[in-house]
Amino acid sequence: MMQKTKAPEILDAKVVAKSRLFQIEALDLRFSNGVERTYERMKPSGRNAVMIVPVTESGDLLLVREYAAGTECYELGFPKGLIDPGETALEAANRELKEEIGFGANQLIPLKEVVLAPSYFSSKMTLLMAQDLYPEKLEGDEPEPLELVRWPVAQAEELLDHIDFGEARSITALLLALRQLNSR
């Protein structure tokens, strides 16, 4: 078992940069050994997100191909999005499925809650697997229609090698979903 270390004392917190989407906060910290240091992080927004691995009755994974400004290309990944105020992770997952792939799910199985980069971000993403899908479409906020890609679960190892499937959260979600499917 790991020993619990006392968290550093926050001496000061101030916003040092701001954009339409993000705020960067500088934290002045004092560690238990007396060392003081300034760390920068994305200021917590208080909003978490979901990512869903939809699995059809016929054994296909449903993915989307969408433009990612960070990499300046189209990426292949699982449906995802922010949890709206007042929504649970399960409600957000079902809404995102309907908006991005045109299906809802009668069964949503939480897989794990993850943090992208805990040194810089506090927001969490709940990874889920969706089964018992039914057609239902909601209007989403994407600037263009997302391409729906069906991928056989039986060929999931090949998906891990696909050049467009590189997002760490999607890879993590896939591996956790496969573990869940194989445990049955």
Image (spheres, rainbow, N blue to C red):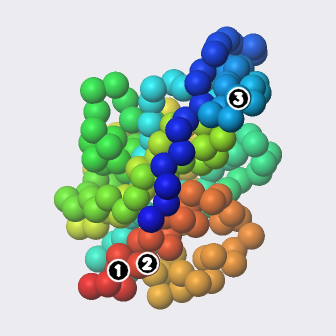
Crowding near the residue tagged with mark 2, few <14, some 14–19, many ≥20 C-alpha atoms within 10 Å: some
Mark carried by residue 50: none
Image side of residue 115 versus residue 130, left or right: right
Residue 134, by quadrant, is bottom left
Q: Position of residue 25 (x, y in %)?
A: 68, 20
- CA distance separating discs 1 and 2: 5 Å
Q: Secondary structure at mark 2?
A: helix
Circles 1 and 2: CB atoms closer than 8 Å? yes
Q: Amino acid at mark 2?
A: Leu
From the top left corner, tell me how far across and down residue 123 is, in percent. Answer: 51, 37
Q: Amino acid at mark 3?
A: Gly
User: Left or right of 61: which side holds 94?
Assistant: left
Of the residues under marks 1 and 3, which one precedes in the sequence? 3
Q: Residue under label 1, please give it.
A: 181
Identify the amino acid type marked 1. Leu
Residue 178, which numbered label?
A: 2
- Is residue 102 visible in the rendered structure shown here? no
Q: Residue 94 at x, y = what percent? A: 30, 48
Residue 160 drawn above or below residue 141: below
**CA separation in Å, label 2 and label 3:** 46 Å
Image quarter (top left, top right, bottom left or bottom right) of the C terminus: bottom left
Q: Earlier in the sequence, mark 2 or mark 3?
A: 3
Toward the viewer: 85 or 16?
16
Which residue corresponds to the image point at 27% horizontal and 26% vertical from the top-left?
86
| Percent position of residue 23, x then y | 66, 19
Give the quarter of the image for residue 118: top right
On screen, residue 100 above or below 40? below
Q: Which residue is mark 3?
A: 34
Q: Secondary structure at mark 1?
A: helix
- Of residue 63 and residue 90, the one placed in the foreground of this image is 90
